[in-house]
Image (cartoon, rainbow, N blue to C red):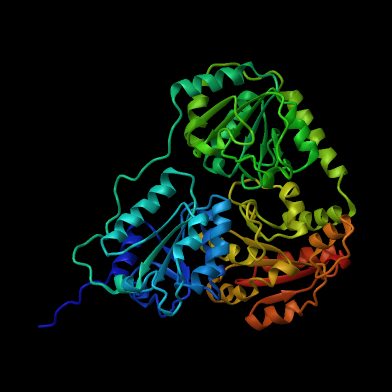
Amino acid sequence: MLQTRPQSAGEALVALLENYGVDTVFGIPGVHTLELYRGLPGSSIRHVLTRHEQGAGFMADGYARASGKPGVCFVISGPGLTNAATAIGEAYADSVPMLVISSVNHVETLGKGWGELHETQDQRAITAPLTAFSATAYSTEDIPHLIARAFSVFNSERPRPVHIEIPMDVLAEPVTRDWTQPVTTPARRPAATQQDIAAAAGLLQQASQPVIIAGGGAIAASAELVQLADQLGAAVFTTVAGKGVLPQSHPLCAGAVLCLEQGWQFVEQADVVLAIGTELASTDLWRDKLTLTGRLVRVDIDTRKLHDRHPATLGILSDAASFARQLLMALAGTSANPEYPRVVAQLAGLRSQITESYEPLQQTHTRVLDVLHSVLPDNAFIATDMTQIAYTGNHYYPVEQARTWLHPVGFGTLGYGLPAAIGAKLAAPNRVGVVLAGDGGFLYTLQELATAVEELDRPLLVLLWNNDSLGQIRDDMVDLDIPPIGVTPRNPDYLKIAAGFGCRVARPDSMDALRQALSEALGVPGVTLIEVHESVV
């Protein structure tokens, strides 16, 4: 009689993740993760083979931003984890839920310096500054507890990456009991007290010119913030991470213009500012801090954000959506702000001032972005790289929904756009996906075109902005009277490379040709790379 082989910890871990609702993992199998991969063929989890571990991390990031669910990646110990570290840092900076599971050397070798394959002195020391927590599973019984702790972070705290490393011998060890069921009572995010709500409502009811600033932490509160803006007659500014929290077409939407002087000046004139789910960081503002003259109410689930560079008149520890719902109830029955028409007119003037202030290069960007916007549906998402046209798009490109503009705000990583878009597309296959990348950053992760072609059977548009330079750094050098050096690399023929991967390609030489190329790409399954040279548009 055949005996059933007991599950290894690697197999049981896959079953546990499946029961937590994980449907996709990104990674590259290696000799140190074979036991982890043993469990995948019999599960419903889709494994996406990336071409570099940094790509696996960025794909997990894009998956999480598009879906709201944690992105998951499997990487080997040593170089696999160090390759993924940049993507982990980006997810940490932008508060993206990501679960990184890596192998590590056998328990008895850890810290010994015996020269084992992929050995580091202390692997967790690499990820500790980049994660909510980094931990080692020294036994099979540690694994379910660490996974439960990770999902507790995702469900109750500021959602940042978690790294769990599992020694090779622990991954291979048989599991003696069934620990593959998830924790059924997960932790929840904090809610504001009635005293907090009453105090916030009192300040806002007295305000004649309130302003709301919504960050990435307010994405789940979009519907409530629309109602709140209408009730208060408040202008709503978002950070780049919060783009779409209020539809751009809403008359009270100022957009993501906090990085511009016109935006600063408008906010600084408010008598009450309600900041929800935002750090108000220098990467949001492109200056150290706002000079606020009114009172500041800050709502966040990270206590460290309530009184940092912008100390609050009232700091409230709360989930954004639950706070907004409670505040709406407290304001029910109060009359709407009579200043609503005046605020709408002010915002229309603000938008005009901003577009009229654009320099020639930004005007070129806006023409391209206008064409892009004209052909895309409202629910299309755009994953951008660190490139000048995306910087213009951060404050110019109009979006109607949250989770549609994915930009690496906090860490500012080159190479983000393509793999993030692949992850987002796998999370939301029915939405049109766009990559907006520059020629310099695109080379960082260009190899992930292989993954895109292999995995995607619906349209993904790669709009490659080519100025044959590291344009932003070149311009910064010139502004600082530094002779430009290292900023004019020799570019390859991107169309030949993309075609070699199996992409459809185009190189339009006018705005009309660009519109036609984009429109045609929407009807083609798979990946289309469209190269637009700055000199021809």
Work out whether 203 lies above or below 507: above
> In which quadrant will I find the C terminus?
bottom right
Q: Residue at x 46, y 55 (%)?
A: 70
Between 431 and 315, the residue placed more toward the observer is: 315
Q: Residue at x 53, y 19 (%)?
A: 199
Q: Position of residue 353 (x, y in %)?
A: 85, 38
Quadrant occupied by the N terminus: bottom left
Q: Position of residue 424 (x, y in %)?
A: 55, 60
**Residue at the extreme left of the image, as rendered:** 1
Q: How many marks?
A: 0
Nearer to us in this view, 11 or 355: 11
Please tell me which residue lies in front, 497 or 268: 268
Query: At 63% from the left edge and 19% from the top edge, which residue is drawn?
Result: 336
Whether residue 49 is visible here, answered yes or no, is no
In this picture, residue 165 sits left or right of residue 201: left
Q: Is residue 311 left or right of residue 388?
A: left
Q: Position of residue 297 (x, y in %)?
A: 59, 27
> Can residue 230 be seen at all in this image of the molecule?
yes
Residue sitting at x 66%, y 71%: 444
Image location (x, y in percent) of residue 256: 70, 43
Q: Quadrant of residue 25?
A: bottom left
Using the rendered view, name the quadrant where residue 174 is placed.
bottom left
